[in-house]
Image (tube, helix red, strand yellow):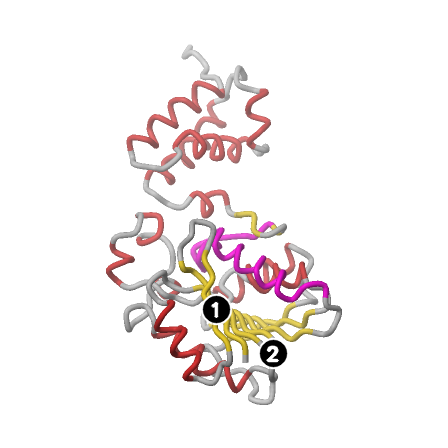
Amino acid sequence: MAEMLTVLEVIQRSSAFLEGKGVESPRLNAEWLIASALGMDRMKLYMQFDRPLRERELADMRSLVARRAKREPLQYILGSTPFHELDLKVDARALIPRPETEQLVEKIVDFVGGSDHPLRILDLGTGTGAIALALAYSLPHAEILAVDESAEALQLAEENALRNGLQNRVRFLQSDWFEAIPIELRFELIVSNPPYLTLEELHSAQPEVKDHEPRAALVADDAGLADLRLIVQGAGERLAGPGSSLWMETGIAHREALSELCLASGFLAVEGLDDWSGRPRFIKAIK
């Protein structure tokens, strides 16, 4: 009879295997995957290192580790990711929400402050619904419309609204940017994390990104600026009036071109904001 492997032994072997496949943070990845296979929180693994594993449990673990070894994103394998107090379902229908986007939400919440006035917000290219749902969670007086061209992404966003009890706070609409939004609607705040990578940037990205996440949510023409330009040019007539604002996550080489475009499009003030790593990541434009 074969000797049974313990939790710790499987973590160690899986970690070494993932490291050999070029996976970043292989030990952490192995712990997450094994905890998922066992249906428990990762921290509970530390109290069960000596636990022998049954063959059925090992088979489940091998399946998850094999998927990660092929560089499928950890979040897709686990099926969810935390984002600004929320737990979001994630899969190949939409881009995995990034920490930088979480920072964009925090900047918007800080900007709006504790105002209890009704605030109409438009989230363009909502994907998983991360930005719209996080703003709905943090701003109880906000009315939020979230749009996406992808019907699959919108379905995922609606599932996340239900998952987080926010289904009555956000409306969803299939639209190619502003195209299907009723022309009479006006918003105090428009936010977007659109595609902004160039093909060259995508090709140099990690396999998790270039081989598994939806390309349409990542890449834009015109040196990554095509969708950002459409948003800037269309936002002016959709914003409510003086003091209303446009917020965008952008490529790190886009700040100057977008700032000039915002001013040329009639915005009165434009500010570039850096992310946690000091990279020029966001644009805030005030009408």
Q: Amino acid at mark 1?
A: Glu
Asked if labels 2 and 1 touch by Cβ distance under 8 angstroms, the answer is no
Q: Where residue 13 sits: x, y (%)?
A: 38, 23
CA separation in Å, label 1 and label 2: 14 Å
Indicate which disc, 1 or 2, sits on the residue closer to the N terminus.
2
Residue 47 in which image quadrant = top right
Instruction: Name the residue at 31% across, 48% down.
Output: 206
Q: Where residue 119 sits: x, y (%)?
A: 67, 73
285 is within the stretch colored magenta: no
**Mark 2 packing: few (<14 Cα in 10 Å), some, or many (20+)?**
some
105 is within the stretch colored magenta: yes
Question: Mark 1 = which residue?
Answer: 271
* Front residue of 117 and 7: 117
Q: Quadrant of the C terminus?
A: bottom right
| Left or right: 211, with 10 as reference point | left
Mark seen at residue 243: 2
Residue furthest to the right in view is: 116
| Left or right: 115, with 199 as reference point | right
Q: Amino acid at mark 2?
A: Gly
Q: Where residue 128 sits: x, y (%)?
A: 52, 60
* Front residue of 286 and 119: 286
Dot 1: element? strand
Instruction: Name the residue at 60% across, 84% down.
Output: 241
* Stretch in magenta: 87-114
